[in-house]
């Protein structure tokens, strides 16, 4: 049947009814019934295994252990040993890529920008992270749980395989919503599991067709970031690396691939974990660059990974000498975070920097004053050792004068970069001084506006005192165990 044969024909015996011919990949339920008992058992839907499922689980676990991704993940974990430095994106530094490639016995392209550009290295690396064979702490990857992996039961192996597979899958697609990558994998496996399966020449087109029909946002995540490579072919290569499809030109789904499809259906987005799992220890070095300004204007700061976007907003206001008189918003992927008092889509106080950068595939942007559109690009450069005895964020470098707020285009004015002055104000911020200064300015304005005589002054000061004593927002204590 041709993939584009979607016409609707009337049945001759019943003219009033119309029948739509099924596509090759619409037969998911036919085979899923065979694997659904195992899927229910795996997801906790039943405490009883169906007859013969023990043998099936053992066979699937052997396939999972033997797949190229996990075999090489074990090799990488053994090579990493007591520690290797990693980048802010949790991948090997470029200088270590050739050594890791030799450990795996793979050929590397002539020029490598990042370890993530080499699938034969990057996918086993992600598998090792997903399976817990590697852990990252303080900017270094260390080997862990290798002995546990060798002794793992069959059901534990399958659980670790599924985590590894999902982690590699979500790293493949340029999407800020990890559930989209999971859905792309499910759709690709659905096409492969159809009866009759598409031929080799039709397979990539069939996968692209299904993803396209699933919606614009999903297809956009599927189709970008691969350059001249066909994203469907890259997806098939990933599936083959994890043993979900055969490593042959025909690309046929394996029993492990069929189980993976049932597993995704049973466990869904729970496979992705949550932002609560993000490691929030350590200190980030962030570069905050004001866009569309000449000469260049940027600030480099050290700030705890556990700080929220709302707290980063306060730091940016100090670093660029903004007054805080206008609205602002952070853009993290396709989500916007801001002050919930002004109907922000997401609350900037409910997400930490660690969670925000884990979600973002690109630098985070911060826009201040929607009229003037002062746009800042925020890049997480690396994890750093905290400054001794520091109890607040620190500006460690910068360049360029910042524009004076509300100065107008006709008579631009600039504020010179003053690292010492910025750090003095950040220290006040850490102790609540910045907030106190802002309140004092507001209080003085209230007094000057409302007080026209002695009685009025007393009333105004009473109002000020009551507002100070009943504030519901105490200053944040910036001190953390890591600082």
Image (cartoon, rainbow, N blue to C red):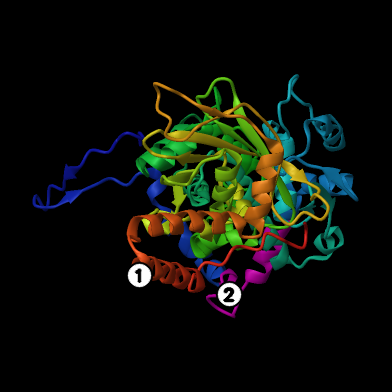
Residue 33 or residue 291, whichever sits in front: 291
Q: Quadrant of residue 238?
A: top right
Q: Going by the picture, which residue comes out furthest to the right?
A: 82
Decide if residue 276 is on the left or right side of residue 133: left
Residue 308 or residue 325, whichever sits in front: 325
Q: Which residue is mark 2?
A: 50
Q: Going by the picture, which residue comes out furthest to the left?
A: 16
Query: x, y (%) of residue 396?
Result: 73, 39
Q: Quadrant of the C terminus?
A: bottom right
Q: Is residue 401 above or below residue 195?
A: above
Query: x, y (%) of residue 68?
Result: 74, 44
Residue stretch rendered in magenta on the structure: 41-63
Which label is found at residue 455?
A: 1
Observer able to see residue 273:
no
Q: Quadrant of residue 382?
A: top right
Q: Residue at x 59, y 23 (%)?
A: 296
Query: x, y (%) of residue 259?
Result: 57, 58
Mark 2 or mark 1: whose residue is earlier in sequence: 2
Decide if residue 326 is on the left or right side of residue 384: left
Decide if residue 222 is on the left or right side of residue 166: left
Number of the front mark, 2 or 1: 1
Query: x, y (%) of residue 58?
Result: 71, 64
Would residue 219 be counted in the magenta stretch?
A: no
Residue 217 or residue 68, whichever sits in front: 217
Q: Residue at x 60, y 54 (%)?
A: 355
Q: Quadrant of residue 434?
A: bottom right
Secondary structure type for disc 1: helix
Residue 287 or residue 105, whichever sits in front: 287
Q: Residues within 10 Å of mark 2 (few under 14, many from 20)?
A: few
């Amino acid at each position: 049947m041709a993939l584009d044969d979607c016409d609707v024909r009337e049945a001759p015996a019943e003219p009033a009814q119309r029948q739509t011919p099924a596509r090759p990949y619409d037969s998911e339920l036919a085979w899923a019934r065979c694997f659904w008992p195992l899927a229910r058992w795996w997801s906790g839907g039943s405490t009883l295994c169906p007859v013969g499922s023990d043998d099936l689980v053992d066979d699937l676990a052997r396939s999972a252990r033997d797949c190229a991704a996990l075999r090489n993940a074990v090799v990488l974990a053994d090579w990493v040993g007591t520690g290797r430095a990693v980048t802010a994106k949790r991948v090997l530094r470029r200088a270590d890529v050739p050594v890791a490639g030799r450990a795996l016995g793979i050929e590397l392209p002539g020029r490598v920008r990042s370890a993530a550009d080499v699938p034969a290295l990057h996918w086993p690396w992600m598998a090792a992270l997903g399976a817990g064979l590697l852990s990252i702490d303080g900017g270094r990857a260390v080997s862990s749980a290798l002995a546990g992996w060798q002794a793992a039961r069959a059901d534990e192996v399958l659980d670790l395989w599924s985590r590894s597979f999902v982690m590699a899958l979500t790293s493949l697609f340029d999407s800020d919503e990890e559930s989209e990558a999971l859905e792309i994998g499910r759709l690709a496996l659905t096409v492969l599991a159809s009866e009759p399966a598409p031929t080799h020449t039709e397979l990539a087109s069939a996968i692209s067709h299904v993803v396209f029909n699933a919606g614009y946002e999903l297809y956009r995540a599927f189709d970008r970031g691969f350059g001249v490579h066909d994203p469907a072919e890259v997806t098939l290569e990933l599936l083959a690396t994890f043993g979900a499809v055969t490593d042959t030109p025909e690309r046929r789904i394996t029993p492990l691939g069929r189980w993976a499809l049932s597993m995704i259906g049973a466990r869904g987005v729970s496979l992705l974990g949550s932002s609560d799992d993000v490691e929030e220890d350590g200190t980030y070095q962030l570069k905050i660059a004001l866009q569309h300004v000449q000469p260049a204007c940027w600030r480099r700061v050290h700030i705890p990974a556990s700080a929220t976007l709302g707290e980063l907003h306060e730091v940016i206001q100090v670093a660029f000498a903004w007054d805080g008189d206008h609205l602002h918003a952070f853009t993290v992927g396709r989500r916007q975070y801001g002050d919930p008092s002004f109907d922000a889509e997401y609350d900037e106080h409910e997400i930490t920097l660690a969670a925000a950068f884990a979600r973002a595939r690109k630098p985070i942007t911060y826009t201040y004053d929607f009229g003037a559109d002062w746009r800042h690009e925020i890049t997480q450069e690396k994890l750093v050792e905290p400054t001794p005895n520091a109890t607040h964020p620190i500006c460690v470098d910068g360049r360029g004068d910042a524009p004076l707020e509300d100065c107008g285009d006709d008579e631009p004015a600039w504020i010179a970069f003053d690292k010492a002055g910025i750090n003095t104000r950040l220290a006040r911020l850490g102790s609540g001084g910045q907030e106190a200064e802002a309140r004092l300015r507001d209080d003085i304005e209230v007094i000057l506006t409302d007080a026209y005589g002695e009685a009025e002054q007393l009333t105004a000061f009473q109002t000020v005192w009551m507002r100070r004593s009943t504030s519901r927002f105490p200053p944040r204590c910036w001190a953390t165990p890591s600082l």
